[in-house]
Image (spheres, rainbow, N blue to C red):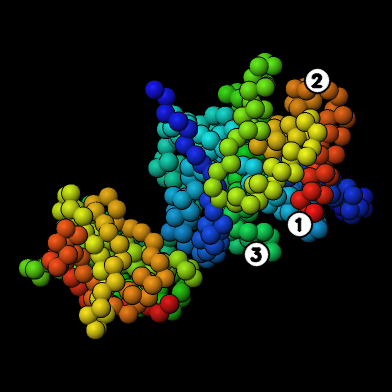
Amino acid sequence: MPMPLRYLQSELQTRLAERYALGMQTLKVRLRCQQLLAELPSMEALVIQWEQRLQPLLTTTVTDDQLAQLNQQHIWQRITQQLPDQPALTKRVASVIQYWQHTLNQLALAACLLLMLWLSQFAITPHSTIPVLPHYMAVLRDARESPSLVVTSARLAPGHAVVKLFPQQALPVGATLGLWAEDPKGQRVLLGHLDSSHLQWTLSKPQWLAIASAERLLLVDSTAPHSVLWQGECQQLRAW
Amino acid sequence: MERPPISTAFPAADATAQVEYWLQEIARGDKEALAALYQAYFRRLAALLYPLLGHASTVEDVIQEGFIKLWHKAHTWQPQRGNGEAWMIALFRHLALDQLRSGKRRTAVSLQSEQEDVAMEDKVVFDAPAPGFPHERERIWHCLNQLEAQSRAAILLSYTQGYSHEELSQHFATPLGTLKSWVRRGMEKLRQCLCH
């Protein structure tokens, strides 16, 4: 059925847009408005304008008790069940990651990750569909040269880069450690302090650039700044 | 001793760029971006939906439905349709409103007694400003405070608590037409003030 011409009147659009944005209408009127919004970009623009004006009012408070009633993990499971299946390769890689995380085998985890990242480069780069692949990675080894910790870093958006270390179990309990980037001239930049509960953080621009130009990453005991506990070559996995 | 409520102010403007990045990745089929968005916004969305829906189970349903809708609709977000965060919040809020209007009515929040009404209005009107959008928040509160009390209350109760024309008409014991006039006058003044 064609849309009645009266809806082209700007005054009526203004009124409906205000009421729709406020949320005062009955379901029937709301559904009608949703149809109109799909057909009338001018009315949709008015609604968007009101949404943006009013949203700062949505500051609200919620109690711990209320939040505790929600099962975040369970809801996420329900959501993922309704999403279309992942491509086979991604699924396989994800299950491999999950398996190694559960076994807590540090040696095998690092090796698996390396293999996965190496394979992902070939499998994913041509399609550019999974941009969460880290830009840099270092496998840090201790004095016995066994791979202990994996550090990955990615630039998620201009001005927003993150660094992440895992597995958590590799870290000595109670220790406060500093992660450093060291360039080919031996200049070091502190990327941040970490402990077993703080293994991921956002990097500042200088810190991100320090990773980009680093030859190796170092993990140093903060109480003994000269003792390097782990270190590893920093490798670029993809361009940014 | 009862613990204080958790502040769930929406994040500062720089979060918008992150949300927009996630929306673009979700539109390309990246489930990790959806997971990251879910992780980052779960509590805030729950805080937004609780006052509207009142029940944990309904809040859960709307969050679930909202993220599935987001997955399918992310490609329709464009910068000219407003900032990504506002777009996403509006998506969840309107889903909750549809749920409310379809009869799955909250019961935890009621309009039963005058005392409750006053307490609720006080809570809405005097809710302390929190970090994030400080300028915009100050501005809209400044403009709201220019309105007549009835218009301000009707707009706030409707926008933040999801009350319909009819409910507000009953609540204020005023004819529906009068209530609509309050809102219309209030919105007109608000628009003039915000555009000034």
Q: Inspect the image, locate mark 1, and give the three-letter code of the amino acid beneath it.
A: Ala
Q: Nearer the viewer, mark 1 or mark 2?
A: 2
Is residue A231 or residue A205 the one in the foreground? A205
Toward which corner of the image does residue A171 lie, by quadrant?
bottom left
- Residue at (74%, 40%) from the top-left corner? B144
User: Are discs 1 and 3 located on one and the same chain?
Assistant: no
- Residue at (8%, 68%) from the top-left corner? A143
Image mark for residue B173: 2
The residue carrying mark 3 is: B79
Is the C-beta separation of discs 3 and 2 under 8 Å? no
* Image coordinates for residue A25, horizontal then vertical, percent: 76, 37
Toward which corner of the image does residue A205 lie, by quadrant?
bottom left
Q: CA distance from mark 1 to mark 2?
A: 34 Å
- Residue at (83%, 34%) from the top-left corner? B182
Q: CA distance from mark 3 to mark 2?
A: 42 Å
Q: Left or right: where does residue B50 sit relative to residue B144?
A: left
The answer, for residue B119, to whether it is visible in the render is yes
Q: Chain of mark 2?
A: B
* Image coordinates for residue A193, horizontal then vertical, percent: 27, 59
Q: Inspect the image, locate mark 3, and give the three-letter code of the amino acid beneath it.
A: Pro
Residue A68 lies, with reference to residue A210, above or below; the image says: above
Q: Secondary structure at mark 3?
A: helix
Graded by Cα atoms within 10 Å as few (under 14), some (14 to 19) or many (20 or more), the crowding at tag 1 reads some
The residue carrying mark 1 is: A45
Q: Secondary structure at mark 2?
A: loop
* Image coordinates for residue A119, horizontal then vertical, percent: 31, 74
